[in-house]
Image (cartoon, rainbow, N blue to C red):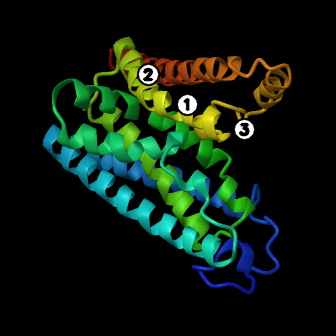
Amino acid sequence: MFRGDYNFFDYKYNISGYNGQDFGSFPQILYIVLSVVIISGVLFAYKKSINDTVKKTLRATGVFLIVFYICKTSWESYYDITQGGGFNYYLLPLDTCSIVMWASLMAGFCKGRIRDLAASWMATGCIVGGVANMLVLSAFKYYPFLSFGAFYSMIWHLLMVLSGLLLIVTDYVEMNYRTVLKGFVFHLAFSAVAIPVNYLFGFDFMLYKDLGGIPVFEGIAASFTDRSMGWINPIMMLCLYFAAFNAVYLITAGIRKLKCRRAE
């Protein structure tokens, strides 16, 4: 595990001697193992919790994530601006992983359809985004394991997976195919903001413009852009999101069928 000349709150440009050594190495594996242990323990503890307890947990999670996001954004912006880089607009809460802030609050505080849509997204899209980032935690490319930059990303994506699975395990969300559709509708609402912003200002929020970082599909998106057919990219990304939502549903449905057979 990397130990160099840096403090916990040092910014990436001030950490000397670190060139991404922890990315894909033991610290990243350790993070995944610890996450599995933590998630398993929390889900076991909450398994028989009533909806009121889950609701309070969702509210607390949403408030924590917003405060955590503000702290991290302020910290990073301070370094970016004071070091002459200017404000990093990718810090705006328009990416897929930012949705969990609003979804957890809506699922905890709201009622009726809004609560249902938000909770459905957390039981599908939230898990997809969390797992994808936990497995390939790009923060380790810039920050060592024992730093705030890595700590923020590790905690954030762990909570995404944990909160989504919590709703499934406690039956706060009834997992059926309608859950996939409702979760995707919630996802589309945020996409309706991200996609125009991407094409107006050249960003790649929610990966709709360039599909940045997605193996194979990133290259396909680039070829469409080169041929002035970039409008296909968000459609392709929407299809990938929808497929991933379905994958979560199929896995949970398979696990439940297996449990029912064992119970018989």
Q: Is residue 165 above or below residue 77?
A: above
Q: Nearer the viewer, residue 1 or 112?
A: 112
- Which amino acid type is shown beneath numbered disc 1? Pro
Mark 3 highlights which residue?
212
> Which quadrant of the rendered structure holds the N terminus?
bottom right
- Which amino acid type is shown beneath numbered disc 3? Gly
Pointer 2 with pointer 3, Cβ within 8 A: no
- Which amino acid type is shown beneath numbered disc 2? Phe
Check disc 1 and report its element: helix, strand or loop: helix
Check disc 3 and report its element: helix, strand or loop: loop
Residue that appears at 29% across and 57% down:
63
Q: Is residue 72 left or right of residue 205?
A: left
Using the rendered view, name the quadrant where residue 29 is placed. Answer: bottom right
Q: Is residue 95 left or right of residue 240?
A: left
Mark 2 highlights which residue?
184
Question: Which circle, 2 or 1, is nearer the viewer?
Answer: 1
Using the rendered view, name the quadrant where residue 78 is placed. Answer: bottom right
Q: Is residue 159 above or below residue 120?
A: below
Mark 1 highlights which residue?
196
> Which quadrant of the rendered structure holds the C terminus?
top left
Residue that appears at 63% across and 85% down:
7
- Which of marks 3 and 2 precedes in the sequence? 2
- Which of marks 1 and 2 precedes in the sequence? 2
Residue 146 visible in the picture: no
Q: Nearer the viewer, residue 143 or 237?
A: 237
Check disc 2 and report its element: helix, strand or loop: helix
At label 3, counting other C-alpha atoms closer than 10 Å, the crowd grade (few under 14, some 14-19, many 20 or more) is some
Residue that appears at 48% across and 49% down:
93
Locate residue 175, reporting x and y percent: 34, 21
Locate residue 77, reporting x and y percent: 56, 68
